[in-house]
Image (spheres, rainbow, N blue to C red):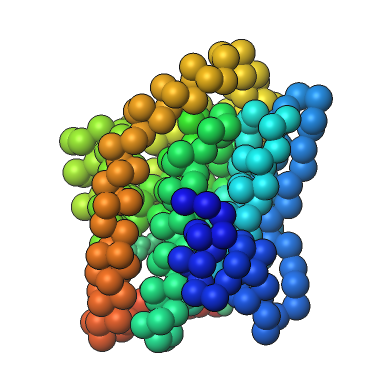
Amino acid sequence: MALASRARALLPGARSWGAVLARVTAQRAMSHRVVVETDAAAGVAVMKFRNPPVNSLSLEMVTELVINLEKLENDKTVRGLIFTSESPGVFSSGLNLLDMYGRNPAHYAEYWKAVQELWLRLYQCPMVTVATINGACPAGGCLISMTCDYRVMADNPKYTIGLNETQLGIVAPFWFKDTLVNTIGYRASEISLQLGLLYPPAEALRVGIVDKVVPEDQVHSAALAVMAQWLAIPDHARQLTKAMLRKPTVDNLVRQRDADIQQFVSFISRDSIQKGLQMYLQMLKQKKA
Ligand SMILES: CCCCC/C=C/C(=O)SCCNC(=O)CCNC(=O)[C@H](O)C(C)(C)COP(=O)(O)OP(=O)(O)OC[C@H]1O[C@@H](n2cnc3c(N)ncnc32)[C@H](O)[C@@H]1OP(=O)(O)O
């Protein structure tokens, strides 16, 4: 779908992703939640998450991620993209609970469409993508990292990764599940997803949800080394191979995008689910206190 059509689909009346962002942030001061640093000579960009306090994937953050991805895809000098958190400690706390709690159905639909868009773009990204996981990586954060071609995690037992949705009383949608199955296999996914497991680095490596665990101070150099290895493969061959491997999973969502939005809105609007999210948010506050 062309850029303008995609933007219109996300927010009716908007002519481009820029217009989407303008609308999303209209009531707020413009800020950059995503910082992109490009090394043109190496053909590698680093996308740093900067959405304090915990890099939650708010509607604004998701929109900025999509816009920046689109820009990089159009920049033919960039062949590889590394994702990381600007502040070690939290890679991303996942979807923004405040976009899924106490809002109206129109907001839930808008949010879910944006989250779908981000996943579709990441999962089909023609660039080599590497996640440098330098902090906690639950749920939506884990999903973003699993869309990457390779995951390097810092060896810090405080950091965990996984799809923990069931622990919040919510259900990861089928395309989260598909991404997990494609990453760690079916049986491991049955255990992981039902129990909502969050793995510390050594276990994450064992189950295969990350590909490499390195000392924290080496996480970026390790990601660059992996990137160099992947960039040694001719782009066209690697890109077609990636597309071939991922197409069935992508098509599965594309076929039922609207139904998936409706299902999300109806699920998240339930009183019992809203109550559960309220309790989870309270639990996070109490833990802090
Ligand atoms: C059909 C429905 C499908 C939906 C699929 C859902 C996918 C998701 O991604 S749901 C989100 C799941 N995320 C989590 O369960 C992570 C929750 N957060 C944490 O576990 C921790 O915050 C942490 C490990 C990521 C970081 O810990 P720490 O550094 O100690 O920070 P705090 O816990 O004190 O949090 C600071 C601040 O941020 C708020 N917050 C945390 N996570 C989120 C979030 N995902 N969305 C929105 N807000 C979040 C937390 O409540 C604190 O707020 P204040 O108390 O107001 O400062």
Residue 132 at x, y percent in the picture: 59, 38
Residue 235 visible? The answer is yes
Judge by depth and name the residue closer to the eye, 113 or 56: 113
The picture places residue 11, in percent across and down from the top left corner, at 51, 72
Depicted 197 relative to depicted 201: above or below: below
Residue 77's x, y, as percent?
73, 30
Q: Quadrant of residue 235?
A: top right
Q: Is residue 200 left or right of residue 252?
A: right
Seen in the picture, residue 72 relative to 257 is either above or below; the reply is: above
Q: Residue at x 54, y 63 (%)?
A: 7
How many labels, in total? 0
Quadrant containing the C terminus in the rendered view: bottom right
* Viewer-nearest residue: 243 or 132: 243
Does any portion of residue 229 appear in the rendered image? no
Q: Which residue is depicted at the point 19% across and 44% down?
A: 190
Residue lying at 49% horizontally and 44% vertically, measured from the top left: 122
Q: Position of residue 33 (x, y in %)?
A: 68, 61
Q: Is residue 136 above or below residue 153?
A: below
Q: Residue at x 65, y 28 (%)?
A: 79
Q: Nearer the viewer, residue 247 or 199?
A: 247
* Pick the front one: 289 or 96: 96
